[in-house]
Amino acid sequence: MSLLSVLTLDENELVACVACGLCLPHCPTYRVTGLEAASPRGRIAAMQAVQFGDAPLDATFERYMEECVQCRGCEAACPSSVPFGHLMEGARGVLHEQRRSERRWRRRLAEWLGYRLVLPRHRLLLALTWLLLVAQRLHLVPRRLGLPRLSVRSLARRLRVPAGDAPDAYLFTGCVMDAWQRDTHRAAIRVMAATGARPGLPRGGADCCGALHVHAGREEEARRLARRVIAALPGTAPVVVDSAGCAAAMKDYGRLLDTDEARTFATRVRDFSEWLARQPPPAVRADGGRVVVQDPCHLRHVQHADGAVREVLGRAYELAETDDDGLCCGAGGAYNALQPALATQIRDRKVEAIRRAAGDGRPRVASANPGCAMHLAAAGLDVRHPADLLAEALE
């Protein structure tokens, strides 16, 4: 039978692809496999076969969709402006509803624990982070996982902002970054204050933006989290986000929720460097050191804010560019956990490009996304957030 009623993607978006192939060099999974089924063109053809033809919504189709890292590099290269990210999110949403019972019980349990139990409950995430810290001290956590070195001092101290009236800008703290990379938030607050701004923090409820849920096709859960985030950040002040993946998701709240309130909120969201580039420049000293800029995909291809990173970092550092046209590093949110072999092959190419850009010595790498930073650190690179680098350069 036709499965038109099963895979219900936007038909205008689905037929926009003309199969020209210009996206192929920009697709990391196609680059490492050479397989048409691992390309954007091939995945769209598979979607069309299910929606318009008699192809089944089976395990093979699911594998094609899940092997996509969702970097959206194909969108930047597409002359037809195919919204591949929306198509992939829609396909994964249907797969989540129709095929989750077919998945192995271990994966279903892990997804329930992560998406339903831990990420939406920040206190629980913090409690588990303390346990992870103890495991690190007992050398039970392999370094190859790339997890940051957790600090008792950092976890025990709450984030604080300068006292004052209504904030000039909020800093969105989120889930994993506040648990594992809170010192980066502190650096961002220091740099924001150095511009003369009064940074503020969200009210309770901004535990998670829902980006990972959207990537996994769990859109209803993402909507619930998005409503909580919007309620926790009232007013009209800009919402500054130092996680590229979170900022990209929050800028898409208008489409996700389809309300005027969500669309208005989305216009307030700024990546950290994007916001900073519009402020009076803080006083920084020229470090003189070289930093290789690694663009997280959701900063470069979705937010188009990669120029702002270079503008603010260039005030203090000598910047080096990779020669791979911003190809993905393979992190992809939970992708490196679900597709470790492909994620590693993709990362190997990125690491080679970073080392070529750095020249001699161990490169310092600037990356504005926690997933990218951890994934690259697992390969032995020294990866820093732009906020950390700028805080170190403040006079």
Image (cartoon, rainbow, N blue to C red):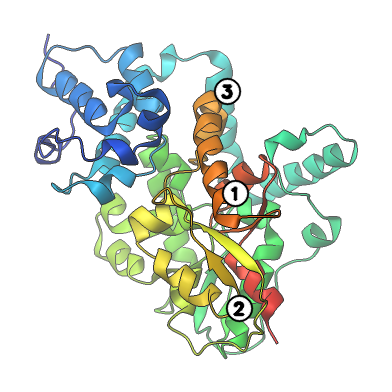
Q: Quadrant of the N terminus?
A: top left
Q: Position of residue 106 (x, y in %)?
A: 58, 17
Q: Position of residue 102 (x, y in %)?
A: 42, 12
User: Which residue is located at x 45 percent, y 79 percent?
Assistant: 277
Local SS, label 1? helix
> Along the polypeptide, which appears first: circle 1 or circle 2?
2
Q: Is residue 322 above or below residue 192?
A: above
Q: Quadrant of the C terminus?
A: bottom right
CA gap between label 1 and label 2 equals 21 Å
Residue furthest to the right: 138
Q: Which residue type carries mark 1?
A: Arg
> Which residue was labeled with disc 1?
355
**In the depicted view, which residue is nearer to us: 178 or 47?**
47
Q: Are marks 1 and 3 in contact (CB under 8 Å)?
A: no
> Along the polypeptide, which appears first: circle 1 or circle 3?
3
Q: Is residue 78 left or right of residue 234?
A: left
Q: Position of residue 66 (x, y in %)?
A: 40, 26
> Which residue was labeled with disc 3?
109
User: Which residue is located at x 60 percent, y 42 percent?
Assistant: 375
Q: Is residue 49 left or right of residue 303?
A: left
